[in-house]
Structures are given as C-alpha cells and as structure tokens.
Amino acid sequence: MKMRTAMGGGIAVLAAAAVLAAGVPQARAEFPEKPVEMTVLFGGTASTIAQVLSETMAGELGEPVVPVSRTGGGGAVGYSHVMATAPDGYSIVWNSNSVNTTAHIGRVPYSYEDFVPIARVSEETPALAVSAEKGWTGLQDMARAVSGSDDHLKVGISGKGSFTHLVSAALFDAMGIADNVTFIAYGDGKAPVELLAGRIDAAIQWPGQFKSYLDSGDLNVLAVTGAKRIDLLPDVPTAQEQGVDIDITMWRGLAAPKGTPAPVVARLAAAAEAATQSEEFRKAAGNIGFMPAYAGPEEFAAVIARDDAFYAGLLDKLGLGK
C-alpha cells in the first residue's frame, strides 16, 4: 500500500512539472553565449581600429569578438559574406561609408537598408598631401600651379570608386581643377612612398599615414576635408578655411544582417559605446589619428541614410553611378 501511494505521488509530481514546463516560458540565455565574429572590410587604419575595438568590446560582452579580414571589391566581399549569415548577432560587420558607395556603384545587389545599424564608433578626416619639393603650402598654391600647366596633376587613389577617389574628385571639382587631374591607383604601394618617389603628385589619405613625413619635412599636408581641424594635425587648415566648400569625413561603425533581434542590437551597441569611452580606445585614437564618435542605432541610421543620398549624387556627377 505504501509502495502504491509513493508511486502515485511521484507520478502526480511529474505530471505537474510537465504542465508547468509546457505553460511557462523557459528562461533564455543572455546574448552572447559564444564568440562574435567581426568582418573587417579593409586593411590599414580600418584594421587597426577594428582590433582595438574588438578587444575592448570583448571585455564588455564577456565573450571574444573576433576580427576576420574579408577585403576586396571596395567592401563588397565582406558585406556579401555578412549578408549570407544568420541574423543572430554573432556575425557583424565593421562598416563605413562604403556601404553606400558599393551599392551605388553597382558592386552589390543590396543597400544599407539590408543591414541593421548597431553603432557608429569613429570618424576619420582625410588629408591632402604633396611632396615638400613641390613648394606648395596651401590649396591655392596647388590650384595656380595646375591651372598654369599643360601637365595633369597625378593623384594617387586606393582604386576607382574608392573613398579616396571620391573625396579627391569632390575636392578638385570644388577647387575648379578637376579637368587637370589624372587618377592613378597605388597598386601595392602606399601614398607617402609614391609621393616621395615622384610617381604621383598628390594623395588624399588618412592623416596617420602622413604625420611622420610631415614632421620630417618630406611632405606638406595642404588641407583636411572635414569642417574642423583635427587633433593629429592641428596646424593644417581645412579646405573650407581656404575658400573651398567641401566637408567629407569617413565614419566607421558596426552593422548586422537585417532581422537581428533588437535586444541583441542593443547589447552590441552598449558594448560599442563602452569601448569608445575606454582609455585604451581613446589612446589609440590619439596615436592613429581618428576620433571616437559613438552614435546609437537610431542616430547612426540617420547618418547612413543622409550619406547615402550624398554619395548617390556625387557618384552620378562623376559618372560612376550604376
């Protein structure tokens, strides 16, 4: 009798537990439960910042953030990879204005709207440099020399349709010397080396590439293309200060495939914000020459949409739009 009572009681308990399990939602594990992969689209400064960002974000998330280089096609290779992954937050992209330009050039069949903005993380302002042997110390010196010569100004760029190409084209158009410019891709070279070797006359690149050559007197940096001077080159005036109406900067940030859950996006954004405020990240900014510039998902989405309209118009004007 006692045995039957014990068995009956056990069955009742199991039955009750089954009912509770069926009727009460089970607690979900908090994101992330495993490493997050960050696709990096470019080398150079982009790769360096990504490394610092991934390390500082990992400390906030409690799981590794692993940067993986997937370069090529002006960002198309990396964007295509991330687009094909599950929208679960474990595959994100370290993106930039290239999300706009790759679409409008026609390198990818999708647009920025196919990604969920997580956070803008940093901004970089391009700088225009020339060999000190040219004797040019400002944009007007360059404009006078180019306008009075039958030779074209040879300008180095990362590649046709690249960000450096677009900024260069916009600057020289605003200066009124676009018809006197020929663009030359670096190939395997880098801007300072190509300038010093005389293979190109001018180049727009990230300030960190030029700083040591400016300090040594080998290069002159004529202008930066943003609306404000930058901390790394405080004595270099903006193009606007020299009467040339241009304001172009590069933002970098994080995005995920469309459909990534909002709580996951919020968790990643919070980690990115904490990273940009860290001492390690700010120290890297000073050394490399970029600005921490956190913006959350909504503000970042507005920035991307605004830039998409700008680059669509610029590419059409340059005859590079699809």
Image: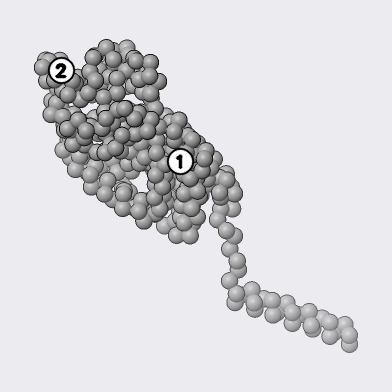
Which circle marks residue 169 in the picture? none
For residue 46, what is the image quadrant?
Answer: top left
- Figure check: 269 above or below 194: below
The residue under label 2 is which amino acid type? Ala
266 displayed left or right of 157: right
Q: Position of residue 28 (x, y in %)?
A: 58, 63
Tag 1, which secondary structure? strand
For residue 172, what is the image quadrant?
Answer: top left
Quadrant that contains the N terminus: bottom right
Tag 2, which secondary structure? helix
The residue lying at 59 percent from left, 60 percent from top is: 29
34 displayed left or right of 168: right
| Total tally of numbered discs in the picture | 2
The residue lying at 48 percent from left, 53 percent from top is: 270
The residue under label 1 is which amino acid type? Thr
234 displayed left or right of 238: right
Q: Residue furthest bottom?
A: 1
Q: Position of residue 3 (x, y in %)?
A: 87, 82
* Residue matched to label 1: 39
The residue lying at 36 percent from left, 51 percent from top is: 300
The residue lying at 31 percent from left, 34 percent from top is: 229
Q: Residues within 10 Å of mark 2 (few under 14, many from 20)?
A: some
* Residue matched to label 2: 145
> Observer-nearest residue: 41 or 173?
173
Q: Position of residue 301 (x, y in %)?
A: 34, 52
For residue 178, what is the image quadrant?
Answer: top left
> Observer-nearest residue: 206 or 260?
206
Q: Position of residue 196 (x, y in %)?
A: 32, 14
> Observer-nearest residue: 29 or 13?
29
Q: Is residue 102 visible?
A: no
